[in-house]
Image (spheres, rainbow, N blue to C red):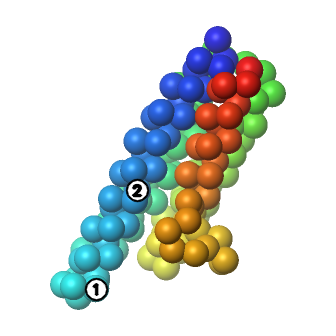
Amino acid sequence: MAAERLGLLARWLEEVAAKIRELESQARIVIEEQGDQKGYEALMREKALLLAGLGEEAAERLEGAGGAEVERVLARLERFSSSAAMALDVGSVFFMSALLYPEDYVAGDNNDLENFILSVRVASAGE
């Protein structure tokens, strides 16, 4: 049961990750081609809000599923949410834009959420 729920969660997380990539792409166009700082900030805020809700939404989706792997997944998603909430609290657009990207990130690589989703996929297949 937990494996099936983790598989469904991974599918949902893939949708969230795609939405985040789309927001980032739009933000890049808005700032680089249109010079619209306010538009850029709004898109980064939307990204951070999506991430801030991940932990709670995942907990609802996994309610009733137990086990060490489910707990690991929920703990990691809560860390994503906490970082995003902190970025929103301080109002730092730079912090919001950097969410999910380590210092050594190379363009075209998976971000931290995408890498995490891969681990959820593996967990859902292995349980």
**Residue 67 image position (x, y, % from top left):** 78, 21
Mark seen at residue 16: none
Three-letter code, disc 2: Ile
Mark seen at residue 20: 2
Q: Residue at x 75, y 37 (%)?
A: 72
Tell me the distance, in whole angstroms, between the alpha carbons under discs 1 and 2. Answer: 18 Å
> Does 82 appear above or below 119?
below
Q: Earlier in the sequence, mark 1 or mark 2?
A: 2
Q: Is residue 26 visible?
A: yes
The answer to which image quadrant residue 3 occupies is: top right
Q: Residue at x 49, y 40 (%)?
A: 13
| Residue position marked by numbered label 1 in the rendering | 32
**Secondary structure under badge 2?**
helix
Q: If the image is split into quadrants, where does the C terminus sit?
A: top right
**Residue 61 image position (x, y, % from top left):** 52, 25
Q: Residue at x 39, y 50 (%)?
A: 18
Task: Estimate how packed mark 2 is, as few (under 14), some (14 to 19) or many (20 or more) residues with alpha carbons within 10 Å.
Answer: many
**Secondary structure under badge 1?**
helix
**Residue 84 image position (x, y, % from top left):** 54, 59
**Residue 26 image position (x, y, % from top left):** 27, 68
Task: Estimate how packed mark 1 is, as few (under 14), some (14 to 19) or many (20 or more) residues with alpha carbons within 10 Å.
Answer: few
> Does 109 appear above or below 94?
above
